[in-house]
Amino acid sequence: MAQSPASASELASCLGIAADEIRDVMIRYPARINSYALDLLGRTGEPIWRQLVPHREELDEAGLPEADPLCETEQSPADGIIHRYPDRVLFTVSTQCAVYCRHCMRKREVGSGTPGTAKLVGAGLAYIADTPAIKEVILSGGDPLMLGDDRLSYILARIRAIDHVELVRIHTRAPAMLPARITNDLVRVLSRFHPLYVNIQFNHPDELSSDAVEACSRLADAGIPLGAQSVLLAGVNDDSGVMTVLMRKLLAARVRPYYLHHPDPIKGTAHFRVPLERGLSILEALRGRVSGMGVPQYMIDLPGGGGKVPLLPQYLQDHTGRHLVVYNFEKKRYTYPL
Ligand SMILES: *Cc1c(COP(=O)(O)O)cnc(C)c1O
Ligand code: SF4
């Protein structure tokens, strides 16, 4: 992390591009490509490059004017808490990440603050303790695993001391973008707080390097159930072949695909948008060709804070009183008696 090129000129010289190409974007949205991620990048415009290297199109705000269309700020009753569903809250405990993804849905705030300064968590912890309906706390950010082991352990212990909280979940990209962070010490800390789930953002098969797979193994060996949340991104993974390989590799790494997120309409991410039909046809291609365990739910997140809703290909063609007409994964038509 310490070796991540910090300025536009340092980063540009690592990438072999002109600093002018990225300077203006970096003033607006932070960039970080740590030394591990630099090795993964590939060439200009390739899938990992596209996710991590600042691009001028981020400053094009004509199509998508809103930085927070999901109304996370409005749904925040305490600093760091987003409370949208009755039984669970998102708790953003860090603004730092191992890399800053150009498609980030929290682009408006990630990377703010000085690296190394901890976010205050007192108000969030008090809100969770005072709200018995909360059964699950999802640590998010930023990336919670950018906190040091002691800080993380403190936060987890405070959450675990609240009787009504049954589950803790951590949303992270560290196993994919900074696998060295998954140390044995970290795993020991996490495994004191079961039941604890870890969901990891993996968007492209190349992110499952041997280091990343080992990082996942360390977590899985500690009895931590692992899920993947992938974001559908133009020019990265909007292809059924790429997505099939990604899902197979995730299962082989003991990471169960959970959600495929349709990209949120966030300011500065218009160049990642994909038509909904493409997502649905990818899902159709996965079903029947990949283990059912490897077919994620395809989710849209409703603007206005309505929450996530799964979308399915149209398998049900007709519904008479006495039977259903259904298409299978090969697009063959079947009737199903009622
Ligand atoms: C996505 C999200 C959750 C978690 O939703 P699950 O469907 O349980 O994965 C919780 N709170 C907020 C605000 C979210 O955006
Ligand atoms: S790791 Fe997550 S929070 Fe951080 S920049 Fe990437 S998508 Fe955003």
Image: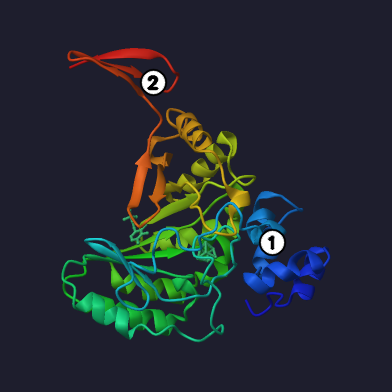
> Residue at 50% of width from left, 53% of height from top?
265
Asked whether mark 1 and ligand 2 are closer than 8 Å, the reply comes as: no
The answer to which of 161 and 16 lies nearer the viewer is 16
Residue that mark 2 sits on: 328
- Label 1 sits on residue: 53
The residue at 44%/51% (across/down) is 255
User: How far across and down, in percent of the image, does residue 228 sit?
Assistant: 44, 52
Across and down, in percent, residue 125 comes to 28, 80
Q: Nearer the viewer, mark 1 or mark 2?
A: 1
Q: Image check: 69 left or right of 136?
A: right
Disc 1 marks a residue whose amino acid type is Val
Q: Secondary structure at mark 2?
A: loop
Whether residue 193 is situated above or below residue 322 in the rendered picture: below
In screen coordinates, is 185 left or right of 136?
A: right
> Which of pointers 1 and 2 lies earlier in the amino acid sequence?
1
Residue at x 30%, y 72% (from the top left corner): 193
Q: Is residue 61 left or right of residue 303?
A: right
Q: CA distance from mark 1 to mark 2?
A: 40 Å
- Asked if residue 190 can be seen in this view, the reply is yes
* Quadrant into which the N terminus falls: bottom right
Q: How is the image coloured?
A: rainbow
- Crowd tier of the residue under label 2, counting other residues whose Cα lies within 10 Å: few below 14, some 14–19, many 20 or above: few
Q: Position of residue 192 (x, y in %)?
A: 31, 74
Q: Name the residue type under label 2.
A: Asn
Packing grade of label 1 (10 A; few <14, some 14-19, many >=20) is many
* Element carrying mark 1: loop
Q: Label for residue 283?
A: none
Q: Quadrant of the C terminus?
A: top left
Q: Position of residue 220 (x, y in %)?
A: 40, 59
Q: Residue at x 25, y 82 (%)?
A: 126
